[in-house]
């Protein structure tokens, strides 16, 4: 979770990240146990849609990462310095990831194709090649998208300023929103083009940044909404409307998610028609932004206050480690050897009761012993300058 100089830390967003992680853990737990596929005609169709947790992650990331840049662009202040930005992003992602990768590889808990494939895993570029995309920490394909996003955000802001020729002044909110709309639409153009392409190197294009830029752009749009000046009356009214109707937005989010579970999207590893997959992706983005939006504005709703409860925010704080470690306890060589269950045995509850506490324990250790000290050292280095 990124703290910015433009606002205090939003505890409710930390809790949302923890909530999203739990969704992913339940999704993977049910799938690996075989429960999802066995009940595909009933509750399995809904459990399989819990992978919306990834879309929620991306909306949160788009909002938090872009917000300092949105503040600078809208208010005409200098853009965040690139070097501190990249170092802080690296400190947030790499130490915890490398610890999990090397420890799990040492325990023979990962699928590693070859040395070059492992090197791709180390630098989180494995999702660009079909033979390596689900090797190493299998769910880390989302991290490749995150890292790609981290790289391009400063470039986007810089190019934007250059193109508008207003280096020393503010950029209009409407111009920013138009640019984000272009990014949003560009995702669907990219998905259609790559789907109909026969080039082998595009086989994993649906797992690249351009295929998920729409969801990130929705989060970036929330950043623009929050940073918009009071003079932008339409956006101010929208912001107040969202703040005053938190419950309605959350209910709407759930409703859209329920629709996504009833459009015949693929269950498990099955494939579905492209247009259905595209519609499902769109619905995930809509549901995610509806859920996240009320927690980005200054809402005083009871739900927002409830999500600021310390236990929930703590879970969000260490959720990155939970995300990295949980799959090792669910399936694969390590799980088959040491865990009290076997693949496709249908034991969802047993798995969940083992996997979640174990992942939380290791994630906490990783965060407090390794990740937080490194992040604090990087932050202090640039704060003292």
Image: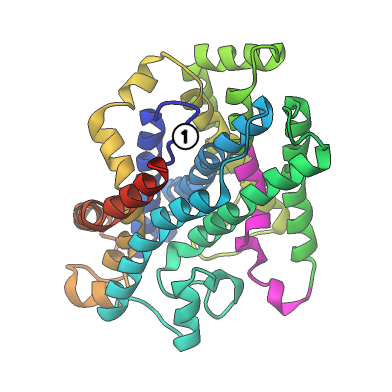
Instruction: Give residue 153's position: percent from left, percent from top.
Output: 62, 48
Using the image as rendered, state which of residue 273 and residue 280 is in the foreground. 280
Q: Is residue 52 visible?
A: yes
Answer with the quarter of the image where residue 107 lies. bottom left
**Picture residue at 80% right of the left edge, 61% below the top:** 193
Q: Position of residue 175 (x, y in %)?
A: 78, 31
- Number of numbered callouts drawn: 1
Q: Is residue 305 magenta?
A: no
**Residue at point 72%, 53% (across, down):** 275
In this image, 203 relative to 41: left or right?
A: right
- Indicate the position of residue 144 as horizontal and vertical percent values: 53, 62
Whether residue 246 sits left or right of residue 28 in the image: it is right
Residue drawn at (67%, 33%), measured in percent from left and top? 73
Mark 1 element type: loop
Name the image colouring: rainbow
Q: Is residue 167 left or right of residue 265?
A: right
Q: Quadrant of residue 29?
A: bottom left
Quarter holding the N terminus? top left
Name the residue tied to disc 1: 4
Q: Is residue 344 visible?
A: no
Q: Nearer the viewer, residue 231 or 18?
A: 231
Q: Nearer the viewer, residue 314 or 229?
A: 229
Q: Which residues are magenta?
A: 198-218
Q: Residue furthest front?
A: 385
Depicted 39 relative to depicted 301: above or below: below
List x then y, in percent, for residue 319. 33, 48
- Magenta-colored stretch includes residue 213: yes
**In which quadrant will I find the C terminus?**
top left
- Mark 1 Cα shell of 10 Å, populated few (<14), some (14-19), many (≥20): some
**Magenta stretch secondary structure, dominant:** helix
């Amino acid at each position: 979770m990124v703290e910015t100089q433009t606002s205090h830390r939003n505890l409710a967003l930390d809790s949302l990240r923890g909530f999203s992680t739990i969704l992913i853990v339940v999704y993977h737990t049910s799938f690996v146990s075989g429960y999802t596929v066995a009940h595909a005609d009933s509750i399995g169709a809904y459990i399989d849609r819990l992978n919306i947790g990834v879309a929620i992650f991306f909306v949160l990331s788009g909002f938090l990462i872009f917000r300092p840049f949105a503040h600078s662009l809208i208010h005409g202040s200098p853009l965040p310095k690139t070097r501190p930005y990249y170092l802080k992003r690296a400190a947030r992602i790499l130490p915890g990831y490398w610890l999990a990768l090397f420890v799990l590889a040492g325990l023979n808990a990962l699928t590693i194709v070859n040395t070059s494939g492992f090197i791709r895993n180390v630098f989180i570029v494995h999702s660009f090649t079909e033979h390596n995309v689900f090797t190493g920490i299998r769910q880390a394909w989302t991290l490749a998208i995150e890292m790609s996003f981290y790289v391009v955000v400063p470039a986007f802001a810089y190019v934007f300023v250059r193109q508008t020729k207003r280096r020393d002044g503010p950029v209009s909110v409407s111009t920013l929103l138009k640019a984000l709309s272009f990014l949003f639409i560009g995702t669907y153009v990219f998905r259609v083009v790559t789907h109909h392409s026969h080039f082998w190197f595009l086989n994993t294009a649906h797992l690249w940044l351009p295929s998920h830029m729409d969801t990130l752009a929705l989060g970036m749009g929330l950043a623009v909404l929050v940073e918009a000046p009071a003079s932008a009356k339409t956006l101010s009214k929208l912001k107040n409307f969202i703040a005053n109707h938190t419950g309605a937005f959350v209910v709407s989010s759930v409703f859209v998610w329920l629709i996504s579970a009833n459009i015949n999207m693929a269950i498990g590893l099955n494939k579905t028609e492209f247009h259905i997959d595209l519609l499902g992706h769109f619905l995930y983005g809509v549901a995610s932004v509806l859920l996240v939006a009320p927690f980005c504005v200054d809402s005083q709703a009871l739900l927002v206050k409830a999500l600021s409860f310390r236990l929930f925010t703590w879970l969000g704080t260490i959720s990155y480690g939970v995300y990295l470690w949980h799959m090792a306890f669910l399936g694969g060589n390590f799980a088959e050897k040491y865990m009290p269950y076997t693949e496709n045995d249908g034991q969802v509850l047993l798995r969940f009761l083992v996997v979640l506490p174990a992942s939380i324990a290791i994630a906490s250790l990783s965060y407090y012993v390794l990740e937080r000290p490194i992040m604090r050292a990087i932050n202090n280095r640039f704060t003292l300058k």
